[in-house]
Image (spheres, coloured by chain):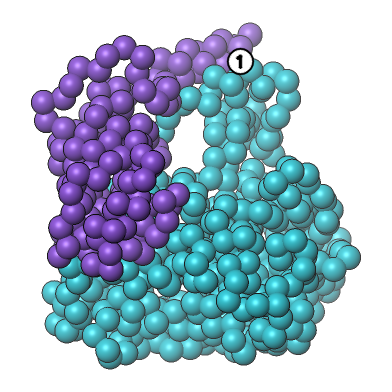
Amino acid sequence: MRTVYWMLMIGTLACHGRDDAKPAAAKAAKLKLDHASQRDLARELDDADRLGTWSDVRHRWQGQDLEWTVTRHRALCGAETACHVAAFPVMRPAQRGWLPELRFAPGEYAKLDAACGAAEPCEVVIAGTLAKLEVSGEMPTSVQLSNVVIKGAKRT
Amino acid sequence: MKKLIYGSLAGGLIATAGALTASASSHREAPMIAEDQYVDNTDVYSFISPTDPSRLAIVADYVPLLLPTSGPNFYKFSDEAYYEIHIDNDGDAIPDITYRYVFDSQVKNGNTFLYNTGPVDAISSQSLNVTQTYDLWKIDEHTGHRTRLMQDAWVAPWNVGKRSFPNYESVALQAVRSAGTTQSFAGPRDEPFFVDLHVFDLLGVGGAHTTDGVNVMSIVLEVPISEIAAGGTRPTSATDKTSVVGIYASASRPQIRILRKNHASDDYGKMIQVSRLGWPLVNEVIIPLKDKDKYNRSEPRNDVANFGAYILDPEVPKLLNLVLNAGCKPTPVGGRTDIVGLLAPNGTAAADLLRINIAAGQTNAQSHFPNGRALADDVTDTLLTVACNNGSAIGDGVNANDKPFTTTFPYLASPASGNP
């Protein structure tokens, strides 16, 4: 009886503390964020690390349409289906491990490839939807932008 | 004895407990695993057999820095964990084959504190009071099909001392088990990793042999290369993506432990990975403190997405310059894509996997880090040199293990004795 009680308690607590992923894009219209740069996201993740507000961050950010300036490294973005970019310049040393994964709108990877060519690294302005934001106290941060279009590129 | 429960009662609990969260080689490399020594994965090695080039040897070490005089409860593997060796054979950094070791301990006489009640001359000796056995499973990760390769195989006993084991190694080697084409060993061995651990005192290395004389718990597996190659055939081209396999070892524990008054504890729930390792030293010195536990929980396939920035811009060369004035090159504007390249040979997906070329013609002589890892490879020097990137070789001053390795299975040296 006591065991059953504790199991129910654990189950209740588990549901209360639930912090698992919700569907990618919120059905209702998202309130557009005033501050939506990658630095703003990083700041909120740092706060979540202290306060445990992972769920709030995910709900606010997931589904947002964003325009970010990122850095393409050829070694990390070698194919349309395998492209990660650096959200922050080399900071000596890196303060955050995550590299956003890009899922391109049709034709946009080719546009990126043409714009950057062999330049290494290549600074790119992208626009896309933050389709997946995996954040929690137990697993590493993972960021995926979908329907990405290239707005501009600067060879450095 | 603790219990691992998978019954129908636990099934309902698993469903709800799946949402529980825990806030919160590598030897003691991350905060949480440092509190759970028995499942701390310390090193992985892999090399083509020195005596049969058609076979691949894999060594996965756990439970770091063990004093030989650690009685009366000598070290062993955890009965409540999965110890696994994962193999990716098609370059996508996702395991295709997993070998799983599941251990079980036995006590013949609970009315004594002794590990052995007399001299032990055989692994089946009645004088050996505390024993451990294991089952070895092979799992096809595509179908989920599991095959039990070995059942109740002996774990080699602890090298208690000369009075208990007048001829320890002959007893320990009775734990070498063959089943079909698979050969396996599990038990204590001399710690093969050599390093000056004063490196963690503000990089104060000076050639001190700090891992001499300590032991580790080793799992050694040797299988035909064709059995782990994509499509079941050893590749003929050495440059193809499928000519390299990526290996990592892990340990997992049940998600929930309930401490009991009338017995030790009960364990419930799905298995949660608590430790993993492919390349040496990645979680130790690449991943910063705040993400080390998360690294242990995560999968190699997501390493670039989760930790790529740390690899692009590692902390080590800055520390070497700051503390030792080592003259390491600053991280280039483009980041350390050379290290990313080392983690992605032959066009494979970049990930923290120990990759080794298994194509026909590859031999033991070519099995040296980062193409696999031989037991004698000085990976600390190799990785410090790569990290510093100034064209000069640098190192910790420790260049070899204190004991020689063997050319016969299980290859590792006999563990240090508790009473030599």
Amino acid marked by disc 1: Thr
Percent position (x, y) of residue A125?
18, 47
Residue B153 position by quadrant:
bottom right
The one of B370 and B68 positioned closer to us in this rendering: B370
Q: Residues within 10 Å of mark 1 (few under 14, many from 20)?
A: few
Residue A55 position by quadrant:
top left
B367, above or below B130, in the image: below
Query: In the shown orientation, is residue B183 left or right of residue B269?
Result: right
A27, above or below B117, in the image: above
The one of B344 and B141 positioned closer to us in this rendering: B344
Q: Colour of chain B?
A: cyan
Name the residue located 53 percent from the left edge and 23 percent from the top edge. Answer: B17
Residue A6 visible, this orientation: no
Q: Chain of mark 1?
A: A
Percent position (x, y) of residue A142?
36, 41
Name the residue located 53 percent from the left edge and 45 percent from the top edge. Answer: B273
Hey, which residue is sitting farthest right in the picture?
Answer: B180
Query: In the shown orientation, is residue B83 left or right of residue A137?
Result: right
Quarter of the image with the N terminus of chain A is top right
Task: Label the purple chain with its letter.
Answer: A
Q: Secondary structure at mark 1?
A: helix
The residue singled out by tag 1 in the image is A3
Residue B367 position by quadrant:
bottom right
Percent position (x, y) of residue B301?
49, 52
The one of B337 and A102 positioned closer to us in this rendering: A102
Residue B246 visible, this orientation: yes
Name the residue located 36 percent from the left edge and 64 percent from the top edge. Answer: A75
Quarter of the image with the C terminus of chain A is bottom left
